[in-house]
Image (cartoon, rainbow, N blue to C red):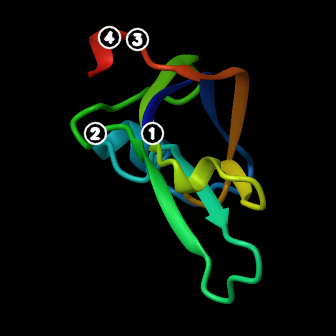
Amino acid sequence: DALYLVTAKVKLVLTPSFGGTGASSCQTSGEKCLQGVYHHVERNDVNPTWKGMGRTRSSEQYADGIWYDYVTTVTFSQKEATPGMRSRLYFDGPEPGIDVLIDDVALRLAGEEHY
């Protein structure tokens, strides 16, 4: 198994269709923040395995309209690195009416400080 570090610059932007209280749930309560999701499927697998990469802790609240650093780790198993494995990485999370701007995404082996 190998531990990887996932980093990105992220900004949540309220759109005119946002029907909330004027701020995202991520800003007001630390909920529904951005989450990276890693999905892998074995060849001919009818029940794909979803593997969450992590999300900001509920105590971390980020102001809307401000760039912040998204940082999390994910462990890829030997099985997930074998030929014939289909993989997908995407970001999910904020409620409807919020645009997510993502820049400078990186996936690399984690350094010793992350073990």
The Cα atoms of the two marked residues, 1 and 3, are separated by 13 Å
Which SS class for mark 2?
Answer: loop
The Cα atoms of the two marked residues, 3 and 4, are separated by 4 Å
- Determine the residue positioned at 47% across, 48% down: 77
Amino acid type at circle 2 is Arg
Camera-side residue of 95 and 35? 35
Camera-side residue of 57 and 29? 57
Quick one: label 1 or label 3, which is nearer the N terminus?
1
- Decide: marks 3, 4 in contact (CB < 8 A)? yes
| Quadrant of the image occupied by residue 110 | top left
Quick one: label 4 or label 2, which is nearer the N terminus?
2
Which SS class for mark 4?
Answer: helix
The Cα atoms of the two marked residues, 4 and 2, are separated by 22 Å
Residue identifier under label 4: 112
Residue identifier under label 3: 111
Q: Position of residue 16 (x, y in %)?
A: 74, 49
Camera-side residue of 48 and 33? 48
Quick one: label 1 or label 2, which is nearer the N terminus?
2
Quick one: label 2 or label 3, which is nearer the N terminus?
2
- Determine the residue positioned at 61% across, 26% down: 10
Q: How crowded is mark 3: few (under 14 residues within 10 Å), some or many (20 or more)?
A: few
Q: Is residue 34 above or below residue 71?
A: below
Amino acid type at circle 1 is Val
Q: Can residue 81 be seen in this view?
A: yes
Quadrant location, the C terminus: top left
Q: Residue most toward the bottom?
A: 46
- Determine the residue positioned at 37% across, 37% down: 56
Residue identifier under label 1: 74
Residue identifier under label 2: 57
